[in-house]
Amino acid sequence: MKDMFEETIERLLSDFVTPEAIGAAETGAWPEGLWSAIEENGLAIAAAPESSGGVGGSWHDAYVLVRAAGRHAAPVPLAETILVNWLLGLAGAEVAPGAATLAIAGGSLDGGLFSGTLVDVPFGGQCGHVLTTAGDTRSLVLLSCSDAEQAPALNTARERRDTLTFHGARPVAVASLPDSAPGDALLLGGAMIRSAQIAGGLAHLLDMATDYANQRVQFGRAIGKFQAIQHQLAILAEQTSLASAAAEMAFASSERTPAPLPVAAAKTIASDAAGQGAAIAHAVLGAIGFTYEHSLHFTTRRLWSWRSEFGSQTYWAQEMGRAMCARGPDGFWPALISAMAPA
Amino acid sequence: MRLTDFNHAAIPPEAEAFRAEIRTFLDREMQGIPPVVRADSWMGYDADFSRKLGAAGLIGITMPERFGGRAAGAFARYVVNEELLAVGAPVSAHWIADRQSAPLLLHYGTDTQRERYIPGIARGEVYFCIGMSEPNSGSDLASIGTRATTVGDGWVLNGRKIWTTNAHRSQYMIALVRTQGREDDRHGGMSQFIIDLKAPGVTVRPIRDLTGGEHFNEVFFDDVALDRDALVGTEGNGWQQVMAELAFERSGPERFLSSMALLNTLIAQIGAEPDALQAFQIGRITARLMALRAMSLSVTAQLDAGEDPAWGASCVKDIGTALEQELPEVAQLLDTAEPRVDSGGDHAQVLAYLTQLAPSFSLRGGTREILRGILARGLGVR
């Protein structure tokens, strides 16, 4: 299904996600036309099994959708909704209707009612539902966002990262992830989608910077003819490649449940690449790339937030470092190989 | 597909099956080899080890069975090689013959050449080196001047090669030389020849490197007679043949695992409970190893499918060698151990050795600047 997903998402996002549309979303407008098209094409439920009401694509297939969401800077919770519906499917629950998001470090259930303060919730106030955990980190709770007190907040791309506070709300659904799922499955899932979005964003930066280097003439020739610029673009291409390979590895390894080491590796790599890539793109595009009028910043400002969200490079690298040191020198290599073995 | 897409490639089960076999071999044969010897990685020469590996059927495994191989795929070879590198096995004797010479001869060679050389390579007994650079032709390989002149139905070779790894302990060299045209002819008029390094007129002079070791050489050719069977492939097609080899040379696990011995001693030094900085750096290195391996496997799938992933291979090599070179830097940041030559603990010795060896990682097989030029050309700016 990968090719079909890719073709559909590219057509759809190319049509709807214009610089004007991203700019309008930054001022608070909800891109209804875009979201309707996403739902009509089944993309929001792409990776959920048919038994849960989904399309039945594999999680690996969903990689191209999430990457495309990043490449186009789609100002909607497409990646989050695909993830939430996949996780609900893993837990044997029905997909969530409409736009959905997720929150780490949930709250608690008392008499079947959920209470807790959910922070940094992507598009929280704009989604119908939020997936979080209650008590045991494998116990999923799907809540209606309209039941929450909402305090809006914005990341550097002016995407909503809201605080939602629930006082005794009745969940829409309660389900459990299988015991084989890692305890931090939601966080791993979030890290995984951000890694793929960063990979997509970097690919877009590379396209923009390469085009600009071929067009902009100084000292009588295109600046791309200067070796200094060529090598900067080569580094940007390398960082894009590394982030893409790592993100796809994370998806491919997580078909059954999120795979801790591959996801940790992907987010470590992608977060590192995001900063380096954004810096190179801005250096190549010069002053024009620093204007609001030019669309470069729609991607770079996203990268500057996505790299910190769902665990920074430092967080994930330290998680991995502790896990690998615990294996000792003799256990290091076998652990690396088995972490990358097909799921 | 974009250049920067590295489609995920999983190792097929039949290739993965080789892992248990090679690990069993290594458990037995690597006993007692100290970390500082393992630090030599694929520069470590041990003909006994290569012969044992060959006898175990683990060299030339992608070759047809009639030439002593096992008709296995590229991923099986990948599995065997990465396991060898992970433990720092001394594989240098046969490494280039297995990686480049045997596949080159299988692809371009005559039946006579295949039968003469490939079975010996697969036994771990016949070793090859690659003659590319010359004193005035390093990164600018197309400017080579060593020339084979037609005499009768053979050639006479004159000139010299330099920085040739293992020329002093290989039986044969496959050299790229000029057969027609002039030095400014660029990519035309070059051919590949098999040269018997014991032949009259060949002089091999080892060059001591900064570690005190002897890995590379200068090789002189004075009226060396080459018969018709010395030509590999088509006369005049040498440049194209060499370029096709480069993706094999640049995309394998040896482009990011050369410093594994140091990672192992560093982890031992740190212990099971790293502090925050140690955890961060070990995690970051692990992440890059995993991502590079994913990229490298993706390029292997393309090679296996008969594509020419020159761009992807250059990418793997540039990022991979940067990681290999960063390891000694990280090691000295994370630990107070001072590097030591010929004494001190394992970690101190491995640190000393790899710190000195590291500059070569981004020189051998194409420099960082050459690779970035290839990447820029692929992007369409050059």
Image: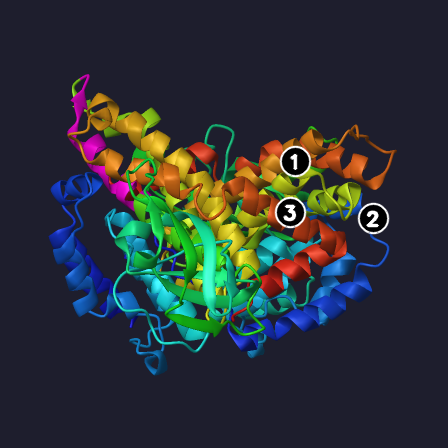
- Nearer the observer, disc 1 or disc 2? 1
B249 or B30: which is nearer to us?
A: B30
The boundaries of the magenta stretch are A202-219
Helix, strand or loop for disc 1: helix
**Residue A203 in magenta stretch:** yes
Binning the other alpha carbons within 10 Å of mark 2 as few (below 14), some (14 to 19) or many (20 upward) gives: few
The residue indicated by pointer 2 is: B34
**Residue A185 in magenta stretch:** no
Query: Do discs 3 and 1 share a chain?
Result: no
Image position of B267 (left or right of B257): right
A203 or A34: which is nearer to us?
A: A34
Identity, as a three-letter code, of the amino acid under mark 1:
Leu
Identity, as a three-letter code, of the amino acid under mark 2:
Pro
Residue at the spot 34% in from the left edge and 34% down from the top edge: A278
Binning the other alpha carbons within 10 Å of mark 1 as few (below 14), some (14 to 19) or many (20 upward) gives: some
Residue at the spot 17% in from the left edge and 39% down from the top edge: A23
The residue indicated by pointer 3 is: A321
